[in-house]
């Protein structure tokens, strides 16, 4: 099964619905495992990487996207319902737009993409919990434990929070479409870097989910899992990362220059994925309410 998901399989056989599912499922699971893992490393008590800071989280999420996109290369590495839906909207204006090379835009394929992304994000979040199980068992501010799974605003104002998410997602989706029409075609590395720059530039207010699956599915995992002292899952905010990412009409592919030389060299379009996290700023305390320090 895995062999059919490799880049070499693109030109050998048409992709099936099962392969679409497993490609996006595995890619999104890797995204959340590595992305959620870097947040857990930064936030949870007695972690060797505790207190690594915002840049550590942004770079961790960027490289998590890099890894996830490669895993889901066969399906274009969407890993993000906002990207999949944007592709569908683009197809309405330009019939040449596909979900990925050889994968048509239709209702069935879109549903398989989105379901796989949400399930993959859920499984990735569960794997983070299993990896850090003993650290989650430590006495700590519940907001920090929730921060491993989902985003939250520094200043709660739902309308402005939603606008912030929409702007960040628009930058991501615009880059995804435009980068596919460039000579460089840097692919997964390029999308990793755009995730880092969105986090550094626009992520401060909300933690830049910019991906409904990345936030909602792990939030559900947080609500279901038996996490010691976890507190609530902040469902009042849960709709913002889902509504915030808007579909965008892509630019049409540029016409060939007058010389007749093709503008593109038939390179695969740069794939895309989803994003990061916003660690709450409150400090861990022990059972007596005193600040906790790292112990190695």
Image (tube, rainbow, N blue to C red):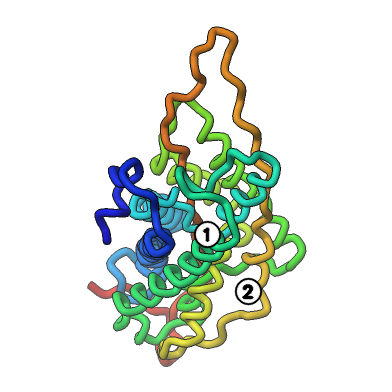
Quadrant of the rendered structure where residue 82 is?
A: bottom right
What mark, if any, has residue 21 been given in the picture? none
Which residue, as the protein is rendered here, is positioned at the far top? 259
Mark closest to the chain's N terminus, 1 or 2:
1
Residue 112 point in image, percent of width and height: 50, 65
Q: Which residue is at 43% across, 52% downward?
A: 75
Q: Secondary structure at mark 1?
A: helix
Q: Secondary structure at mark 2?
A: loop
Which residue, as the protein is rendered here, is positioned at the far right? 159
Q: Which residue is at 43% across, 82% downward?
A: 140
Q: 114 above or below 98?
A: below
Residue 164 point in image, percent of width and height: 68, 55
Q: Which residue is mark 1?
A: 109
Residue 231 versus residue 281: which sits nearer the camera? 231
What mark, if any, has residue 238 been given in the picture? 2
Placement of the N terminus among the 4 image quadrants: bottom left
Q: Which residue is at 33% across, 48% downward?
A: 13
**Residue 52 visible in the shown view:** no
Q: Which residue is at 36% across, 78% downward?
A: 129
Residue 196 versus residue 256: which sits nearer the camera? 256
Q: Residues within 10 Å of mark 2 (few under 14, many from 20)?
A: some
Placement of the C terminus among the 4 image quadrants: bottom left
């Amino acid at each position: 099964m895995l062999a059919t998901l490799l880049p070499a399989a693109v030109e050998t056989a048409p992709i099936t619905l099962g392969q679409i599912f497993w490609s996006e499922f595995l890619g999104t699971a890797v995204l959340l495992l590595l992305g959620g893992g870097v947040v857990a490393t930064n936030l949870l008590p007695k972690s060797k990487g505790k207190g690594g800071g915002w840049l550590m989280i942004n770079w961790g999420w960027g490289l998590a996207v890099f890894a996830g996109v490669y895993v889901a290369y066969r399906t274009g590495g969407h890993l993000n319902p906002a990207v999949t839906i944007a592709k569908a909207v683009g197809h309405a204006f330009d019939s040449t737009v596909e979900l990925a090379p050889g994968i048509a835009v239709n209702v069935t394929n879109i549903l398989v993409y989105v379901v796989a992304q949400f399930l993959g994000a859920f499984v990735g979040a569960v794997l983070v919990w299993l990896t850090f199980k003993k650290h989650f068992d430590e006495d700590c501010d519940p907001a920090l434990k929730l921060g491993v799974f989902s985003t939250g605003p520094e200043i709660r104002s739902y309308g402005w929070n939603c606008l912030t998410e929409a702007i960040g997602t628009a930058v991501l989706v615009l880059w995804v479409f435009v980068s596919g029409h460039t000579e460089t075609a840097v692919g997964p590395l390029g999308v990793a870097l755009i995730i880092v720059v969105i986090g550094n530039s626009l992520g401060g207010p909300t933690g830049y989910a910019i991906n409904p699956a990345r936030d909602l599915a792990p939030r559900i995992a947080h609500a279901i899992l038996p996490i010691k002292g976890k507190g609530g899952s902040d469902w009042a905010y849960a709709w913002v990362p889902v509504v915030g990412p808007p579909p965008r009409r892509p630019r049409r592919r540029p016409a060939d220059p007058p010389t007749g030389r093709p503008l593109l060299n038939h390179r695969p379009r740069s794939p895309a994925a989803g994003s990061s996290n916003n660690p709450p700023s409150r400090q861990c305390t022990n059972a007596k309410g005193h600040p906790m320090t790292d112990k190695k």
